[in-house]
Amino acid sequence: MKQNVIETTEMFDQTVAIKRVAKVIKGGRRFKFSSVVVVGNGKGKAGVGTGKASEIANAISKATEKAKRNMIDVCLFGTTIPHQVVGVHGASRVLLKPASKGTGVIACSIVGAVLNAAGIKDILTKSLGSNSSVNLAKATMDALCKLRNPEEIARIRNKKIEDVLPKQR
C-alpha cells in the first residue's frame, strides 16, 4: 500500500489542451469540455489520456485517470533517445531525432509536454500532417512505443553493442 503512495507522489501531470465541444440536438446545442492530459515521472514512464465531461474539472480528472492507466516505459539513451523514429496517429505524424547533450527539447508544446513527462531532455522533433492536440499527443506516444534499446537491437542483429550504439557528438 505504501508503494502506491510513493509511486503516485513522484508522478506529475500536465493539462495539454482543453476545448469546448458541442453536440447539436433537436432543441439546440449541448456543450461539453474535452481535455488532454499528460502524466509521467520524468524517469522513463509517460502516458496520455483524454476525457470529456460537462465540467472542466471532471474532464481533467477523467483524462488523468486514463493517462495513468495508459502509461508506458520509454527507452532512454542518456538524456535523449537511442535512434530516430516516426510516430503516427490519425492524420498526424511526429518525427523524433536524438540530439547532442545541451540541445534541449525542440518541439511544439504538446509534443514537448509528452517528452518532458518521459524525462527526455535533448531531442529534435518535427510535426508532420495534422496538428490536432489529441492526435499529436498520441502520435508522440506511438513514436516512444517504437523505441528499442541498443542491447535488444545488437542481440537481434548478432552484433556487439558497440557496433549499434549511436555515435556521440
Image: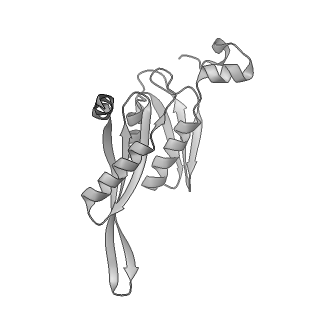
Q: Can you say whether 28 is above or below 14 in the image?
A: below
Using the image as rendered, state which of residue 134 and residue 57 is in the foreground: 57
Where residue 82 sits: x, y (%)?
A: 56, 25
Above or below for 58 versus 146? below
Determine if residue 107 is in view: no
Extreme residue toward the front, this view: 1
State the quadrant of the N terminus: top left
Residue 61 or 27: which is nearer the viewer?
A: 61
Q: How many marks?
A: 0
Locate residue 165 relative to residue 39 in the image: left or right: right
Residue at image position (34%, 54%) is: 62
**Residue 40 seen in this snapshot:** yes
Residue at 29% x, 29% y is 2
Residue at horizontal 25 percent and vertical 56 percent from the top? 57
Q: Position of residue 11 (x, y in %)?
A: 32, 35
Instruction: Please tell me which residue is depicted at 31% across the width and 72% down the height of the picture.
Output: 31
Colour scheme employed for the rendering of this structure:
one colour
Q: Nearer the viewer, residue 144 or 123?
A: 144
The extreme right residue here reads: 158
Residue 89 spot, x, y in % from top left: 55, 51
- Where does residue 101 sit, x and y in percent of width and height? 44, 20
